[in-house]
Image (cartoon, rainbow, N blue to C red):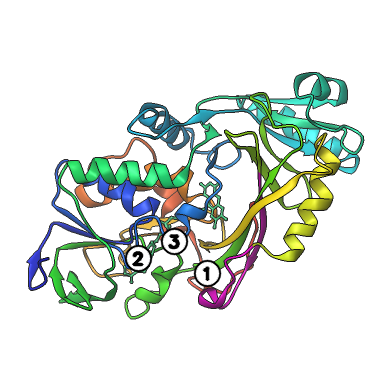
Amino acid sequence: MRTESEDRDVIVIGGGVVGCAIAHELASDHEVLILEKGQVASGATALAAGIIGLTNVYDDVPTLAGYVASFFEAFDGTGDFQYTKRARVGLVRPEDESRARREAKEKAEQGVKATYLNTPALREKYPRFDTSEIVGAVEYGARPGEGWLDPYTFAVTLKREAEAAGVEFRTGTVVTDIDVADGAVTGVKTESGTIRAPTVVVASGWRTPGLLSDLMTLPVRPYQTQCIVLKPERRLNGDVPMGWVSGEHIYFRPEANGHLLVGGWSFAIDDPVAASSDASEEFRQHVATVIPDVFDGMDRAKFVNGWAGVDAATPDQRPIVDASDEGPEGLIVATGFHGRGVMTSPAAARAVRSLLTDEDAPFSLEPFSLDRFDSRSPDFEFRSISDH
Ligand SMILES: Cc1cc2nc3c(=O)[nH]c(=O)nc-3n(C[C@H](O)[C@H](O)[C@H](O)COP(=O)(O)OP(=O)(O)OC[C@H]3O[C@@H](n4cnc5c(N)ncnc54)[C@H](O)[C@@H]3O)c2cc1C
């Protein structure tokens, strides 16, 4: 292992899905070193539900959504990685019906493949839903940007490809500081020495603001969110869509083995290090109440496992991927993925290329800019994304 006075083109701090995607993107024409304090994908990444649901998230930047969707389609079948396209439905309680019908109409008018399914239509198309407590659903039809993947397999496949193209992943290495001289980044300090590079990309998840605290302030705060896997009495088959239950802070997707993954229950937290990695009893109870109401045959579903993870939130639920003047030259920040880091990682990586090389990205970087926020305070009101 090299430790003293190494030189690289780019150092990436963090081997989550975002760091892996950046390494993959830059591998062909840069000498890249990834420094990861634990193992690759050992942070929020491996805990993610793997839902890719671009509708509602990047509708206002269709070129960005299109770029991501094409990336997943093209990457499908690389190594062990698979991307499964699937429709997504927002299940509607009676009190939400008129709002949901309006939403479907407005989306369809904007050219988004959205349909309101009334009770008979929902029952006919998706017979596994129990329609006694729901009146219909807004359906976002299967299209390239709607589907799921296994986040761990995705990250390690990106890593393998990046390694094959020359990127070094150094795990078990904590970056303790970023070196700056004359207003420009010169490298990083680790517990075992200094490594020099003119560009440092900080993709360290919720730990990013702490690592940068001497250099700049970011409107980013940690939050916790949870997942539970249920084994239904009758396995789910291929016609079950992904979706969410309006007003309940719950989303779901079928698993390849016929189980149901249910996620949600997101809250800002002050002490991420002390946060439990188990699904809470409250979330388990909530899932046990809501899911049998909306799915047939779930009354006696078995709890398979559950977990909680910490990710980084921003005020508008979109990440910061920027080389802002507020930081030293050569510093690129990629954080605040707010529950959507897996689905946003290809675009974040392409944005980093553009910031580094001045090559135009095929989409505007404006939605990722730090300047879009009026304040840098991390004390903003946290907004959950579990309801869509
Ligand atoms: C329960 C749950 C469900 C989710 N579901 C989805 C979903 O369905 N779809 C979706 O798109 N997103 C989902 N997400 C969000 C997604 O997981 C994150 O947005 C994404 O993983 C963020 O990736 P990252 O690389 O920024 O962070 P991380 O995966 O947290 O990686 C950051 C890495 O940086 C390393 N690091 C930190 N500090 C240092 C340091 N000083 N030196 C070296 N290394 C350091 C950490 O060890 C870590 O491995 C979910 C998240 C959770 C918790």
- Left or right position of 80 against 263: left
Reply above or below: 4 against 257: below
**Other-residue count near label 1 (Cα within 10 Å), few / some / many at <14 / 14–19 / ≥20:** many
- Pointers 2 and 3 in contact (C-beta within 8 Å): yes
What residue sits right under mark 3 in the picture? Answer: 43
What is the span of residues highlighted in magenta in the rendered image?
261-278
- Left or right position of 19 against 286: left
Which element is circle 3 on? loop
Asked whether residue 66 is in view, the answer is yes
Q: Name the kind of residue labelled 1 in the image.
A: Arg
Q: Nearer the viewer, residue 257 or 144?
A: 257
Asked whether residue 92 is in view, the answer is no
What residue sits right under mark 2 in the picture? Answer: 38
Q: Nearer the viewer, residue 79 or 50?
A: 79
Numbered tag placed on residue 221 in the rendering: 1
Q: Rounded to the nearest whole Å, what is the CA distance between mark 3 and mark 1?
A: 15 Å
Mark 2 or mark 3: name the one nearer the start of the chain.
2
Q: Name the kind of residue labelled 2 in the image.
A: Gly
Q: Rounded to the nearest whole Å, what is the CA distance between mark 1 and mark 2?
A: 21 Å
Q: Rounded to the nearest whole Å, what is the CA distance between mark 2 and mark 3?
A: 8 Å
Mark 1 or mark 2: name the one nearer the start of the chain.
2
The image position of residue 332, as x and y in percent, is 29, 60
